[in-house]
Image (cartoon, coloured by chain):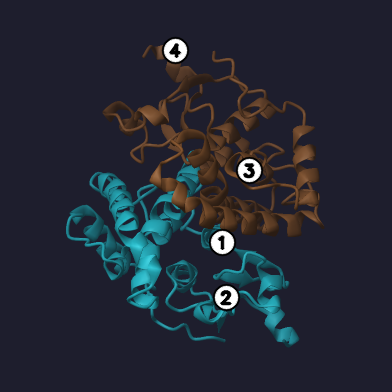
Chain colours: A cyan, B brown
Amino acid sequence: MNTQSFRMLTLFDYLDSGNGYKARLLMSHLGLSYRYIEVDILMGQTRTRDFLARNPNGRIPTLQLPDGEHLWESDAILWYLAEGTDFLPDGRLLRAKVLQWMFFEQYSHEPNVATPRFIMRHLPADDPRRAELPQRQARGREALSVMEGHLAVHPWFVAGRYTIADIALYAYTHVAEDGGIALEPYPALRAWLARVRAQPGYVGLLDRPKSI
Amino acid sequence: MNTQSFRMLTLFDYLDSGNGYKARLLMSHLGLSYRYIEVDILMGQTRTRDFLARNPNGRIPTLQLPDGEHLWESDAILWYLAEGTDFLPDGRLLRAKVLQWMFFEQYSHEPNVATPRFIMRHLPADDPRRAELPQRQARGREALSVMEGHLAVHPWFVAGRYTIADIALYAYTHVAEDGGIALEPYPALRAWLARVRAQPGYVGLLDRPKSI
């Protein structure tokens, strides 16, 4: 690794990851350039000694900062990058509400919306983990219902505008059908997905970043 | 509900919940008084129409603020209460690192350390969810190993001092053995648990708060 690499942001990521996509989408909105290094999670590349020195929890996304420090957990990366921008509101309660929805995303939503998608896209048809699908999908629908209830009366999750709470929740919601969870029953949620897609600088989940 | 209730903090909680304990422990450190309302999660009291109006995700802890607003998700509550105190450091990267460990707690730790404890303490011996125990306990041990690696070289999780990252991780770690996860293999972690217990204003998980 040359010294140049320490003067920029580097994102260690896997293109099909919605968690990684959160960081890519925000960096695109912000016009940030970064080095993009793909790590093959299916080939165990997050469990090597080198990678564990970057993130001892062995997961992507992991962000390397210009000074060489590493930051992991997708929603912590969003928070770091959004600080001081329009994507993170001011105000003690508004900021806590952004976190409330991001913790909801990681605890109630991601394991039940993202994991079925992973099982259906990446595991063999006879994989024993298929047995997890019905319960996860049912809980995923519950999470989408909580979102639908909020979006029926609010255009965005917090502060009446597009923030990192929306980015965190959009990442796996917009591809929930890949995991067998239909979006048809959630009209307010579908209208919100369209509002996110209309934001300046929007990029898709599988749009490969131009690495610098 | 009388008007008085809107002039103070009210915590809707369940005494045996480590997630609720996070808020109780921080409020004890801060010397905050609050109204404590126990909600019986085993009797479905978080799924009533009244409770869902407070938290549409139907979970405790839920904090009602003096102006009547509600905030939920334990780690968002910690963030809100800690803002402006010594329990949340200044500095963009340090704050993001606090969040990194709190998201690690909710995603990699809590489902694998807290859930086995819940299954073993609250479900019948023949409950089918017992089948989840071996995999969750194995992942819980992985999460504790990540913590052990950090604590072998740092006294606290972030900023060299006791913060809400420690409180978030302490809540279920110190009772991991209730879920069949032995703490003996983690000496640095056990020393950290003792440092937390020695903090001024420390209260235990089952110490019932004096409700005002």
Q: Which mark is residue A11?
A: 2
Give A21 or B50, whichever is nearer the viewer: B50
Q: Which mark is residue A41?
A: none
Amino acid identity at mark 2: Leu
Q: Nearer the viewer, mark 2 or mark 3?
A: 3
Lower position in the chain sequence, tag 3 or tag 4: 4
- Which-is-in-front pick, marks 1 and 4? 1
**Residue type, mark 3 in image:** Ala
Instruction: Point out the frontmost of discs 1 and 2.
Output: 1
Whether pointer 2 and pointer 3 mark residues with C-beta atoms closer than 8 Å, the reply is no
Crowding around mark 4 (Cα neighbors within 10 Å: few <14, some 14 to 19, many 20+) is few
| Residue with the mark numbered 1 | A73
Q: Do we see residue A48 in this rendering? A: yes
Distance from disc 2 to disc 3, alpha carbons, whole Å, reads 34 Å
Residue B196: image location, x then y, percent: 75, 37
Say whether mark 4 and mark 3 are on the same chain: yes
Q: Residues within 10 Å of mark 1 (few under 14, many from 20)?
A: many
Give the image location of residue B123, x and y in percent.
44, 36
- Badge 3: how crowded within 10 Å, few (<14), some, or many (20+)? many
Dot 4 falls on a residue whose secondary structure is helix
Query: Is residue B90 depicted above or below A53 in this figure?
Result: above
Q: Which residue is mark 4?
A: B4
Q: Label 4 marks which chain's residue?
A: B
Task: Give the answer, above or below, for where A28 lies relative to B92.
Answer: below
Disc assigned to residue B176: 3
